[in-house]
Amino acid sequence: MTYYIHANKFFLNNTTENGGYLEVTDNGDFGEYIPEDKKPSGKIVDYSDKWIAPGLIDTHIHGIAGKDVMDNDWQSIETMSNALLKCGVTSWLPTTITGSFEQLNDICKTIGGHYGEETGAKVQGINFEGPFFTEKHKGAQNPKYFTDPDLKEFDEWQKSAKGHLRQITVAPERKEAVEFVSKVAQTGVTVALGHSDATFEQAKACVEAGATVFTHTFNGMSPLNHREPGMVGAAMSLDNVNDELICDGHHINPYVAKILIDKKTPEHVILVTDCMSAGLMPDGDYMLGELPVVVGGGTATLKEPPHSLAGSILKLDLAIKNVVDWNLVTPAKAVMMASWVPAVSAKISEKCGAILPGRAADFIVLDQSMNLCETYVDGVSRYKA
């Protein structure tokens, strides 16, 4: 049955509207937005003191609720899918870490074989973080699996994923990286750059070949120097690229986030979590792939020296709240950085990322302090805080 949401504010695709009504059709899609003075007849769900935003999209997430994409188990994906509703996430890209060709291929088969069966946040493709990285900036990736980009391997993974491999990160200094980026980008897959000690020139060559994303900017990449701009300089200065940011207050200083957002504009910054299995879980010992991790004090770090950050335990709803609380952006821009921008970046914006007529009614309810109150999928309330 068609109903209407009444709210204090609506973050629509191009405007922010104060008051009014948003139609949700009987097949679970968005209908039209109706101004406050034209109250429709029919069922009205009242959120008079709340804000309505599109469902958030996490394009870089490894695990949550004790489960990990590297478990290679569909039930783990299903558990994660439902747990993400507690984070305001309604679409996501299950993200691998570096592993063997065979392990990654098996994960592609598992997700590709069950694609669309998840019952919570919608899987919109697979994100490969690795294995084409460099050891100097390995982070929490296992360097024993690092290798040069290989188009035959990529094609095999894509075949196993039934075409659902949506994004892959490479280090620009690896052998044949430019050719790999060019060929993969031409297939419509988003190519990102990261875990790299590349020079500015090497990064630029990959961007000109078709790379469009920098993976968790500032983390795991050659820094900005006044004589050698490095990967960070490329992420900050090159046009038409989108930069991931992990805004948990641990991965980057809020003022560094401000510098990047001011330079790139919110339209080119993607809020991601890089969350690992300990998300929504108590502090303690966990695993990220094959590597032991200790979680405490709001961070996840490798158990062994040098105790690098090992993903995060960040929730995406907290990321949008953080960038507002840090006085970096308006609430509307914060929402956009975790919905429309990741959707465009991952080339899934025809499916999700905005409140538009005819789109699936995946949306969230926020209070006026940016706290998540409720998550809807296909017009049905699925989580209440």
Image: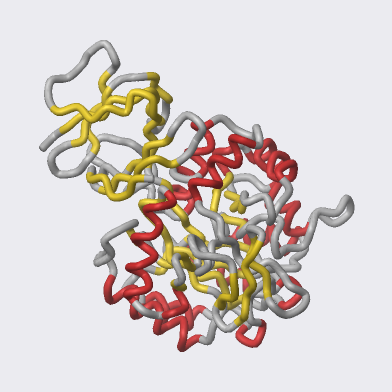
Left or right: 120, with 297 as reference point: left
| Quadrant containing the C terminus in the rendered view | top left
Q: Position of residue 72 (x, y in %)?
A: 40, 80
Q: Position of residue 210 (x, y in %)?
A: 55, 59
Left or right: 278, with 7 as reference point: right
- Residue at position x 46%, y 73% in the image: 68
- Residue at position x 46%, y 55% in the image: 58
Quadrant in which residue 80 is drawn: bottom left
How many numbered discs, if any?
0
* 103 is higher (above) or lower (below) than 197: below
Q: Position of residue 326 (x, y in %)?
A: 66, 37
- Residue at position x 53%, y 86% in the image: 100
| Quadrant containing the N terminus in the rendered view | top left
Residue found at the very far top of the displayed protein: 37
Residue found at the very far right of the displayed protein: 227
* 223 is higher (above) or lower (below) than 168: above
Residue 197 seen in the current view: yes
Viewer-nearest residue: 95 or 230: 95
Residue 182 seen in the current view: no
Viewer-nearest residue: 2 or 220: 2
- Colouring mode (rainbow / by chain / secondary structure / one colour): secondary structure
* 34 is higher (above) or lower (below) than 354: above
Viewer-nearest residue: 72 or 137: 72
- Residue at position x 68%, y 66% in the image: 309
Q: Position of residue 14 (x, y in %)?
A: 42, 29
Left or right: 195, with 85 as reference point: right
